[in-house]
Image (tube, rainbow, N blue to C red):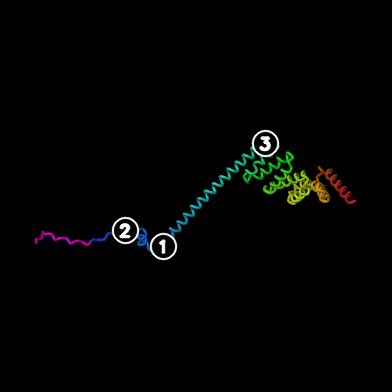
Amino acid sequence: MSAKEKHPRESLPEQEAPEDKGFGERFESEIGTQSRAFFEKLVEHWQKLVAAAAVFVVLVAGYAGFNAYQERQLANSEQALSQALLENQGVERLEALIRLRGEMAKPLLPRHHLEAAKAAQNIGDWATAQEYWKLLVEAGPDNWKSLARMGRSTALLHLGQADEAVTELTALRNGASEEFLPIVLLQLAEAAEAAGNWELALRTFEELQAREDGRQSDYLAFKASQIRQRMAGESS
């Protein structure tokens, strides 16, 4: 065989193609089993966070929608109340306000009750006035309660319920401011007189006399004297 003759090549053994490993196996082989366990916990925790975030988004959207609904209801109530007051007088105003009662947004109920009580009082509907003054006592802000109690006691007196008026005014007296107290005392004295509670009436008129600056002194002296005569007549 000449030197130029070529020796046949020996065939090389076939190399197996590298196995196509999945992501998890490659990750484990490159980073390690412990790291993979940590990664899986992280993924699981992340899924929980995503789910919680989705719930939070839904809640926020629902809260925003509820707020928008409340704002629309408040605006509609304000418009309806203003319209009833502007377009009506006397009996028609009271009737319009009574119709609106169930449609009012809660923040506007105290104002509605005040306007209804005033409208009823202006036309001499003392039963309805008493009802709305009472609602205002129960639902109104603290700085409206004195006015509401005075209004209710006035309505009660007109309805012939003097004993209840005395109870209302006694409660009002205990928390009345110094500047408001003389008005409360005068109404309490008149209510006590109407109820036939002479001792309370006299005591209250005398307290008013002690506070008086001279403008009503003659009237107060007359009332105190009148009640003493009644008490003397009953005791004789």
Find disc 1 in the rendering and name its residue. 37
Along the line of sight, the residue nearer the viewer: 179 or 63: 63
**Which SS type dominates the magenta stretch?**
loop
Residue type at tag 2: Asp
Quadrant where the N terminus is found in the figure: bottom left
Q: Residue at x 31, y 58 (%)?
A: 20
Q: Which residue is nearer to you in this view: 205 or 14?
A: 14
Magenta residues?
A: 1-13
Residue 21 visible, this angle: yes
Q: CA distance from mark 3 to mark 1?
A: 76 Å
Tell me how far mark 2 sits from mark 1, CA to CA: 22 Å
The single residue placed furthest to the left in the displayed view is 2
The quarter of the picture where residue 121 lies is top right
Which mark is nearer the camera, 3 or 2?
A: 3
Which residue is at a point 74% across and 40% down the rendered structure image? 124
**Residue picked out by circle 3:** 88
Residue drawn at the location 43% of the way across and 60% of the way down: 41
Label 3: how many Cα within 10 Å (few below 14, some 14–19, many 20+): some
Q: Earlier in the sequence, mark 3 or mark 2?
A: 2
Q: Nearer the viewer, residue 38 or 214?
A: 38
- Against 119, residue 172 (above or below) is below
Q: For marks 3 and 1, give the one nearer the viewer.
A: 3
Name the element at disc 2: loop
- Compare marks 2 and 1 and give the one earlier in the sequence: 2
Residue 88 coordinates in the image, percent (x, y): 67, 36
- Measuring from the top left, give residue 21's x and y in whole percent: 33, 59
Q: Earlier in the sequence, mark 3 or mark 1?
A: 1
Q: Secondary structure at mark 1?
A: helix
The residue singled out by tag 2 in the image is 20
